[in-house]
Amino acid sequence: MISASLVKELREKTGAGMMDCKKALTECNGDINAAADWLREKGIAKAAKKATRIAAEGLCDVAINGNKAYLVELNSETDFVAKNEKFLELLHQVCEACVQNDTACEKCTLASTLNGTTIEELIVNATATIGEKISLRRVLKVEKNDDEVFGVYKHNGGKIVVLSVIKGTDAMVAKDVCMHVAMYNPRYLNESAIDPKDLEHEAEVIKAEIANDPANASKPENIIEKMVMGRLNKFKKEICLVDQAFVKDPNVTVGQYLKNHNTEAVNYARFEVGEGMEKRNDDFAAEVAAAAAAASKH
């Protein structure tokens, strides 16, 4: 009988997954050193050592099952590996596990099973086989009602993936919204969704900017207050999806575009590979703009 404490000790020593450690100890009759060698021989300990590396490349994807959608970001160390067939298959398996197990976060997805194997084990095995650190960074579950429709847009094979929810059944209009979100990355759906802390912070910044401008030194307080409110209103329109100039027709806002199609925005989610992990050189905005221009011609 292999004790839990022995499994824990081997896991701390090698960095391998719990089930792999238990299997190694079983194969080696509880000999922890032999089990560590067994893991190395199988390539599993080698994979675990890669856990300290930075994995900021990879791909995002989305899986839809009825009224539920699952956005996934799977990371690798290099863009080259992200194009590897084994990596693409693993991404597909993660999405399948999300659908089959109805997972809503990366932790529960890693613990979920697909054909009897956990996603965590599949990732460890892929890391050993491919030779780079592979990690599941995030999973997001989005739900809609029966009278709503999902829209999906994938940019550059999944470097950016956007999901939208709008009223009605027009998936193409919903996709147009996704394309806009891919390019402009709005922070909020509409004004009512804005975090009050964001507004407070922006108001303080605006007040400081106005106060530091010598041209405003002689202006009365009520005028200064109007200037603050004017800039704050402009800020709110800049960060809200429905108030932004629509990517395919800057003469209308996204909200107006949707109204012209007898619908309205309900929700959206945007995943970009490596977002917030490190600065990237890729000019996604320019690429999405080109894609939007090409799409508007058809």
Image (cartoon, rainbow, N blue to C red):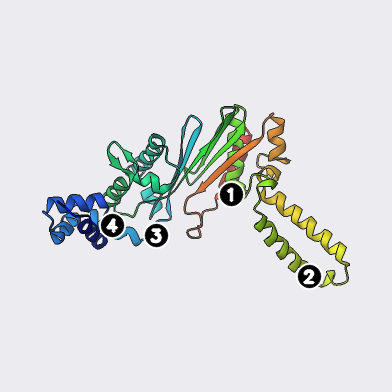
Observer-nearest residue: 132 or 168? 168
Badge 3 element: loop
Mark 2 vs mark 1: which is more N-terminal?
A: 2
Element carrying mark 4 = helix
Residue topped by disc 2: 211
Q: Which residue is mark 4?
A: 48
Residue 202, image x and y in percent?
69, 60
Please tell me which residue lies in front, 227 or 244.
Answer: 227
Q: Nearer the viewer, mark 2 or mark 3?
A: 2
- Mark 1 nearby-residue class (10 Å; few <14, some 14–19, many ≥20): few
Looking at the rendered structure, the secondary structure element under dot 2 is helix
Q: Residue at x 57, y 38 (%)?
A: 164
Q: Position of residue 194 (x, y in %)?
A: 66, 50
Q: Which of the two residues, 102 or 184, is positioned nearer the viewer here?
A: 102
Which residue type carries mark 2? Ala
Few, some or many residues within 10 Å of mark 2 (<14, 14–19, 20+): few
Q: CA distance from mark 2 to mark 4?
A: 55 Å
What residue sits right under mark 1 in the picture?
A: 286
Question: Dot 3 corresponds to which residue?
Answer: 54
Q: N-terminal of the two: label 4 or label 1? A: 4
How many angstroms separate mark 3 from mark 4 (CA)? 13 Å
Q: Are marks 2 and 4 in contact (CB under 8 Å)?
A: no
Q: Amino acid at mark 1?
A: Ala
